[in-house]
Amino acid sequence: MKIAWLAAVVWIGLGSSALAQSACLMPTQILRWTTLDRKTVIVENLAHQKFKLSLYAPCPGIDFDVTARIESQGVTRLDCVRRGDFILHRGFGFGNRCQIKSAELYTPAMQRADEEAAAAKVKASQ
């Protein structure tokens, strides 16, 4: 009995640590999102991991919208966001469906590079 209980605890512990380490953005686990530009969206999940979603084309009105959702082509609600899924938002008029080109973990190094690029763009325009 004690061995079975110990095995269950170890199995649950290993499963949850592997799950915590995986970089998967599930459409049902979105906490907040911001736009870098009309082709790039940064999404934060409930575990406070950030993901960079690149879109195939500029998404009209996405930089002015406050609500959006992801329509996944996956089979279950536990599937990760991936290429071919859509960001649906209510911008001007009826809203838009913008197709996702890629979804990747947004690292601090990527964030610094994006901030430096934005600062350089502002400096160049002055």
Image (cartoon, helix red, strand yellow):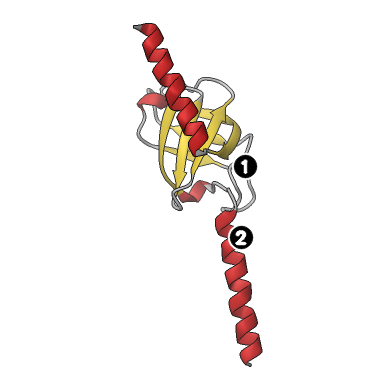
List x then y, in percent, for residue 6: 61, 83
**Residue 108 located left or right of residue 24:** left
Task: Choose top left, top right, bottom left or bottom right for residue 2.
Answer: bottom right
Residue 18 picture location, percent across and down: 61, 60
Up the image or down, 12 lies above or below 99; here it is below
Residue bearing mark 2: 18
Q: Position of residue 75 (x, y in %)?
A: 64, 50
Q: Residue at x 41, y 37 (%)?
A: 33
Image quadrant for the N terminus? Answer: bottom right
Residue 25 screen position, x and y as percent: 54, 46
Q: Name the quadrant containing residue 68.
A: top left
| Count of marks overlaid on the render | 2
- Which element carries disc 1, helix, strand or loop? loop
Q: Nearer the viewer, residue 31 or 6?
A: 6
Mark 2 lies on a secondary structure that is helix
Q: Nearer the viewer, mark 1 or mark 2?
A: 2
Examine the image and state in which quarter residue 44 appears: top left
| Residue drawn at x 63%, y 73% as measured from the top left | 11
Image side of residue 91 versus residue 106, left or right: left
Could you tell me which residue is drawn at 65 percent across and 86 percent down? 4
Q: Nearer the viewer, residue 67 or 51?
A: 51
Asked if residue 90 can be seen in this view, the reply is yes
Q: Earlier in the sequence, mark 1 or mark 2?
A: 2
**Label 1 to label 2, Cα distance in Å?**
24 Å
Question: Is 117 placed above or below 83 here?
Answer: above
Residue 73 disc label: 1
> Is residue 87 among what the camera can see?
no
